[in-house]
Image (tube, helix red, strand yellow):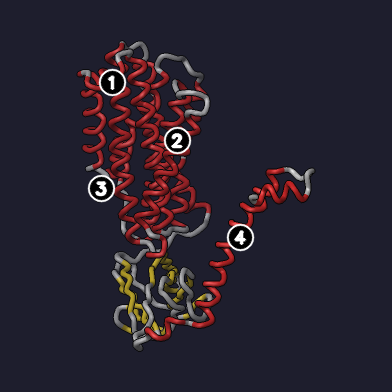
Amino acid sequence: MNEVSHIAAADPTAPVGSGKSRAALLWLILPLAALGLAIAWLLVSDPLRNFGNGAPPVESLTFERTILSSDGIRVLVRAGGSEPMTIAQVQVDDAYWQFTQEPAGPLARGATAWIHLPFPWVLGEAHAINIVTNTGATFGHEIAVAVPTPTRDARSLASQALLGVFVGLVPVAIGMMFFPALRGVGRNGMNFLLALTVGLLAFLLVDATAEAFELAAESAALFQGQAMVVLAAAASFLLLMAAGRRDGVPTGLALATFIALGIGLHNLGEGLAIGAAFAAGAAGLGTFLVLGFMLHNITEGIGISAPMLKKRPPLWTFVGLALLAGGPAVIGLWIGSLAYAPQWSALALAVGAGAILQVIVEVTAYLMRSDGRGPAALTAPATTAGLAAGVSFMYMTAMLVKV
């Protein structure tokens, strides 16, 4: 007799399924208990001591943030070594300087600490910081151009908000103003505009992915930057696909909202990068570059409007979509200049890349349905021309903003 038969014979009133549940619970607990015993034995017996050869532990230190003020220089560092590490000395421009560490003491794996240096930095000059641990390992960081870090005052935040409006919100709104002129286009015109949307989104996808991997390489090794980018993008794509298809295939306003969301997430990542560059003194936006950003992003408004050309949405709809697509640039500038870390910027760009990929899939499917010819519509002259125009415009205008 099996276990369930024994249980049933002992208590005829007991449900048969309860025996199976207890057996499943037992087989769930047993491997966990075995794992706990193995870990306890490893910690108590320390079998790795036989492999010791006197070499120091592996140490890793990543610089995540730099703040320059009238009090000197503060850097945020994150440890990533195999054992707790101790910062023994700090050099600035090849000279040893006194420093304070918050919190004090050894840094465990993954822990962060602020290092404060009362160093009289020079505006516009480059400075090199070198941290020495008690094992003699050194970790360097360069301040390319020393400028005061933006402060959390109303004037600074207002200036950044104004820049974010011109970089993200204004061009999207201008692009959406073409909506009345585009209404009433025929099938070929609609195919051109939808393919134009796919083209500009395809460029943003490649751009966001490349920037995400670049930033991930600057983050601490324990974050596993490349894997984080791929997993975050995949999760974003799958979640948005599930949400978008929950009530059927998105069309009209629903599809325009997903396009605005994908562009907004990308603009959030761009805002983070711009804000961080300002905080580090690595970039100075002149009027020419601001105009370049506006031209680069103006097509995004046309892409958002394309799925709604067969309808007559109210004015508040365009306002909401413009805020969704362009508003995150302001938030990104604030976060990037005040609380920047490369792994979070990489994560934001990866999520944006996944959202953009979801929109590309949905817009392509919408193009095939609205045309009526299915996949054959993708090779029509108007479609290929729109795709080429979208990619080319984004590529050419990107030359104005890459420094």
Q: Nearer the viewer, mark 4 or mark 2?
A: 4
Q: Secondary structure at mark 4?
A: helix
Q: Secondary structure at mark 1?
A: helix
- Amino acid on which disc 3 is placed: Lys
Q: Nearer the viewer, mark 2 or mark 3?
A: 2
Q: Which mark is residue 402?
A: 3
Q: Which one is nearer the viewer's eye here, 236 or 177? A: 236
CA gap between label 2 and label 3 equals 24 Å
Q: Is residue 57 left or right of residue 391?
A: right
Dot 3 or dot 4: first in sequence order is: 4
Q: Secondary structure at mark 2?
A: helix
Q: Which one is nearer the viewer's eye here, 317 or 110? A: 110
Q: Is residue 184 left or right of residue 13?
A: left
- Residue marked by disc 1: 375
- Amino acid on which disc 1 is placed: Pro
Please rate how many residues cluster around mark 2, counting C-alpha atoms within 10 Å: few if below 14, some from 14 to 19, many from 20: many
Residue 163 in view in this figure? no
Residue ID at (39%, 32%)? 359
Q: Is residue 41 left or right of residue 181?
A: right
- Amino acid on which disc 2 is placed: Leu
Dot 1 or dot 3: first in sequence order is: 1
Q: Nearer the viewer, mark 2 or mark 1?
A: 1
- Residue marked by disc 2: 261
Q: Nearer the viewer, mark 4 or mark 1?
A: 4
CA gap between label 2 and label 1 equals 26 Å
